Image (spheres, rainbow, N blue to C red):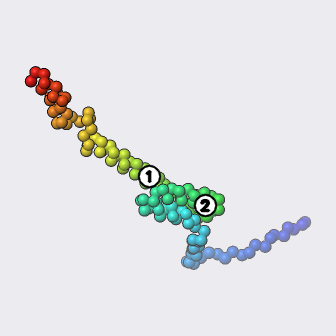
């Protein structure tokens, strides 16, 4: 009978639950800088264009190189697009508010001047013929 020799395995020490857990430190050298720039500029509120551009570039770099910071780049990009959407909503609602409430476009709202012109007869036409 041929005996197979078992490969020698190193003895593993039993883990004690009271032993302190060694945490691995985060390596900031592998963090993509453009991802941080994207998030920081998106949080400023006015750097939405920078946040969108640097977020997309950072995502491409992270995909190619395997760096850390993908969640930062995605968050910066999404906040940049949300900022654009909020600015569009804000400007559109301001234009609509200005058109409907503040200004007096002829034909949209009947003002006192329009009724006066109608009663007067458009340039004194009624005054010359029969009044």
Closer to the camera, 59 or 70? 59
Left or right? Give the position of 116 relative to 12: left
Which callout, 1 or 2, points to the residue nearer the camera? 1
Residue 70 drawn at (x, y percent): 56, 60
Q: Is residue 36 visible?
A: yes
Q: Residue at x 13, y 24 (%)?
A: 128
Look at the numbered disc 1 and give the secondary structure of its residue: helix
Residue 96 drawn at (x, y percent): 32, 43
Residue 9 vertical placement versus 70 (above, below): below
The numbered mark at residue 47 is: none
Closer to the camera, 9 or 80? 80
Q: Earlier in the sequence, mark 1 or mark 2?
A: 2
Residue 67 drawn at (x, y percent): 61, 64
Residue 33 drawn at (x, y percent): 56, 66
The numbered mark at residue 62 is: 2
Look at the numbered disc 2 and give the secondary structure of its residue: helix
Q: Residue at x 57, y 58 (%)?
A: 57
Task: List the single residue furthest toward the bottom.
Answer: 19
Residue 3 vertical placement versus 85 (above, below): below
Instruction: Kindly indicate whether the residue at mark 2 contacts the one at mark 1 (C-beta within 8 angstroms).
Output: no
Closer to the camera, 66 or 49? 49
Left or right? Give the position of 81 relative to 128: right
Closer to the camera, 52 or 124? 124
Left or right? Give the position of 33 relative to 128: right
Quadrant (top left, top right, bottom left, bottom right) of the C terminus: top left
Query: Crowdedness of circle 2 by 10 Å Cα count: few (<14), some, many (20+)?
Result: many
Q: Disc 1 and disc 2: Cα gap in Å?
A: 24 Å
Task: List the single residue furthest toward the right.
Answer: 1
Q: Residue at x 90, y 66 (%)?
A: 1
Q: Is residue 71 visible?
A: no
Q: Residue at x 19, y 29 (%)?
A: 122
- Mark 1 — residue? 84
């Amino acid at each position: 009978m041929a005996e197979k020799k078992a490969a020698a395995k190193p003895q593993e020490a039993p883990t004690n639950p009271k032993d302190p857990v060694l945490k691995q430190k985060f390596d900031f050298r592998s963090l993509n800088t453009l991802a941080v720039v994207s998030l920081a500029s998106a949080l400023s509120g006015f750097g939405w264009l920078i946040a969108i551009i640097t977020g997309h570039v950072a995502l491409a770099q992270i995909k190619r190189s395997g760096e850390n910071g993908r969640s930062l780049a995605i968050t910066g990009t999404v906040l940049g697009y949300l900022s654009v959407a909020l600015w569009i909503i804000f400007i559109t609602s301001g234009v609509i508010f200005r058109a409907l409430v503040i200004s007096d476009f002829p034909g949209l709202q009947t003002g006192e001047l329009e009724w006066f012109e109608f009663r007067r007869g458009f340039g004194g036409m009624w005054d010359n013929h029969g009044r």
